[in-house]
Amino acid sequence: MRVEEVKTKPEKSVKGIAVLLSNATLANHLSDILVRLEYHVCRGPIDRDINHVYVVDTKSLPRVPWPSPRVLFASSLSPAIIELCVRMQCLGIIVPSQGVLELKATFDIALMIANNQCALETANSRLLRKLRERKTIEMAKEMLKKRYLIDEERAYHMIRREAMNSRRTLGEVAEEFLLKHE
């Protein structure tokens, strides 16, 4: 009997947002504005523990695993820019004609969404792990019921007793029972 594996994202998601630049010359200008607005601006490798605004040229995006959500900082609005925004799954487009208050509001909202997304991914990962453990326990109970001709409650108590005696989780013990009695 094989334990079903559920694909999950990494336990810790990247915090922050990536600002995609349609024009690389805008990077220094945008970085200066963001620093004045008191954001942590990063143009280097991703730090998973810090809530940064990552400034990224769209040409380098496919090579580097940048965080999502993304905001596109474009020199102008055009059909090509809008299409790029959709393809890169951006939250929105910022153009230089926006004022500082609108820019700050846009980044604040994007960072809140990024933090919420990070929290949801962490909760989802935890729930998928619990579901996988619950499935493993149920499969082990069924195997024990058939092997020893006992009821479900007795099978559960066997798993629980072994988990308590060995100071392991029910899921670890259930998986061990399944592997032993394959």
Image (cartoon, rainbow, N blue to C red):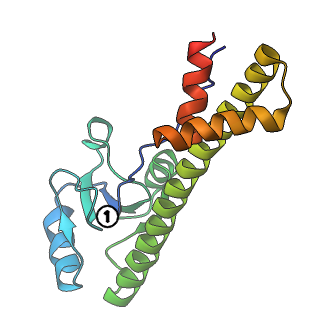
* Residue 22 position within the rendered picture, expressed as x and y whole percent measured from the top left: 31, 54
**Looking at the figure, which quarter contains the N terminus?**
top right
As rendered, which of 80 and 4 lies closer to the eye? Answer: 4
**Residue drawn at (53%, 48%) of the image:** 125
The quadrant in which residue 174 appears is: top right
| Rendered location of residue 160, percent (x, y) | 64, 41
Mark 1, residue position: 75
The residue under the point 18% across, 70% down is 31
Q: Quadrant of residue 103?
A: bottom left
Q: Amino acid at mark 1?
A: Ser
Q: Which residue is farthest bottom?
A: 101
Helix, strand or loop under label 1: loop
The answer to whether residue 96 is visible is: yes
Where 99 sits versus 93, above or below? below
Q: Position of residue 100 (x, y in %)?
A: 31, 87
Left or right of 140 in this view: 66: left
Residue 47 placed where, x, y %? 22, 56
For the point 68% across and 40% down, the residue is 134
Which quarter of the image is occupied by the C terminus? Answer: top right
Q: Residue at x 83, y 33 (%)?
A: 152
Where 42 sits versus 133, above or below? below
Can I make out residue 132 in this image?
no
**Camera-side residue of 181 and 34:** 181
Observer-nearest residue: 77 or 129? 129
